[in-house]
Image (cartoon, rainbow, N blue to C red):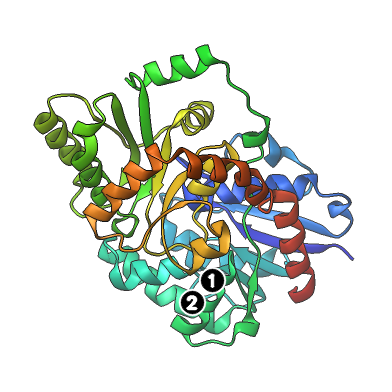
Amino acid sequence: MIKKIGIECHNLEGPRFGVGQTLIQLLEAFSQTSRVAEKFEFHLYFKKEIPSDKILESPIFHKKILRAPYLPPSFVLFYHFLIPLRYFIDSLDGFFFPGYMLPAFFIGKSAVVLTNDVHYEIHNGNLPLRYRLAYRVFSWWAIKKADKIITVSAAAKKEISRLYRISADKIEVAPWGLNKELSKLSFSADEIENIKKKFSIKKDFIFSWGQAFPRRHFKEAILAFAKIAKDFPNLQYLAACADKYNPPILAALAQKVNADLGREAIIYKSYIGNQKDLFGLIKAARLVIYVSRCEAMGLPPIEALCLKTPAIVADNDLTDEIFNNNAFFVKNPDDIEETAQAIKNGISNETKRREIIENGLRIAEKFSWPAASKNFLEIFDKIF
């Protein structure tokens, strides 16, 4: 008998960051998994529009926009009222929620992705109050009512069990995969130079990208770079980060550092929409910086390894689990001087750089979407 699984998909609408980026790749992996149609069909629910991604045309996906007649699109209405209704209207066997929460009025079988960094944002982060309240209430609701919590690393599982005081038996580990295009892309020297020119990069550069929550220490990274920039007059720092500080600070900080140094040392962008440009920049960068105090997995430095670019990361249980010794580490992410020394070492220590690059592909190969698809489907098969 075919199992009908609902999936909440509003994160696929508009610009995509963490949840949206991983969800679309998971759906693609589902569509390419052998004989999946013999066992599952997936009902995808959207708030406002159905994106044009070709993989969503797969016959295993049944797509619906959930809107109340005569009312504008509303996340609260979509998430907490319409989705619970569709569980029964569409006679689903289970529902998958990739965005850390369970709807208020949901009654039925469910699996919810939850990560320890969400707990950090609730209690220590800088998100607007309405988001922190929503995550606080409905992530706890997921802990209490979901049939399974899914997270993406053993370190995250341990932290979630401790922070939410639940049995580790309720938590399944299913690591995300890396974007499959990473291993396919090749760039000529001219293509790399053209991409660099598009972003006003003159020679060598270091690189950060993603959502700039304060726990990821992009401010400290910029200040650390400012400390060593005079020693490396041809080096620039491209920080392509959606500013999540409250109020936003990164654009003004980059402008001030550039004024103090008398050159465009920091290039600040809020988002890089062209995927090939992003991958070309990762490959061309001398070093990637992603010094996060709290992550469940943290894809950017793993993606960097796939493209043979070393990374600077925080020294903690997660990075030890993923990288072993194949990164440059910062023990105290708040220490600007320590981060500055790590940047210097990451640029200059050729022996360590070669070691990281040689081991990087072996590490990156652990994170594949076919494996992720298999893990998720086995979880769905077990609980729904």
Tell me the SS state at disc 2: helix
**Numbered badge on residue 59:** none
> Callout 1, which amino acid?
Ala
Residue 334 lies, in percent from the top left, at 25, 60
Q: Residue furthest top?
A: 190
Residue that carries the numbered disc 1 in the rendered image: 155
Instruction: Tell whether label 2 touches label 1 (CB within 8 Å).
Output: yes
Residue beneath the point at 54% across and 63% down: 82
Nearer to the camera, 316 or 34: 316
Q: Locate residue 171: give its quadrant.
A: bottom right
**Residue at point 65% right, 73% down?**
172
Picture residue at 52% right of the left edge, 75% below the top: 105
Q: Is residue 104 above or below residue 325?
A: below
Above or below — where is 149 with respect to 330?
A: below
Residue 249 appears in the figure: yes
- Residue 216 falls left or right of residue 168: left
Does 374 sit above or below residue 20? below
Residue at image coords 22%, 39%: 228
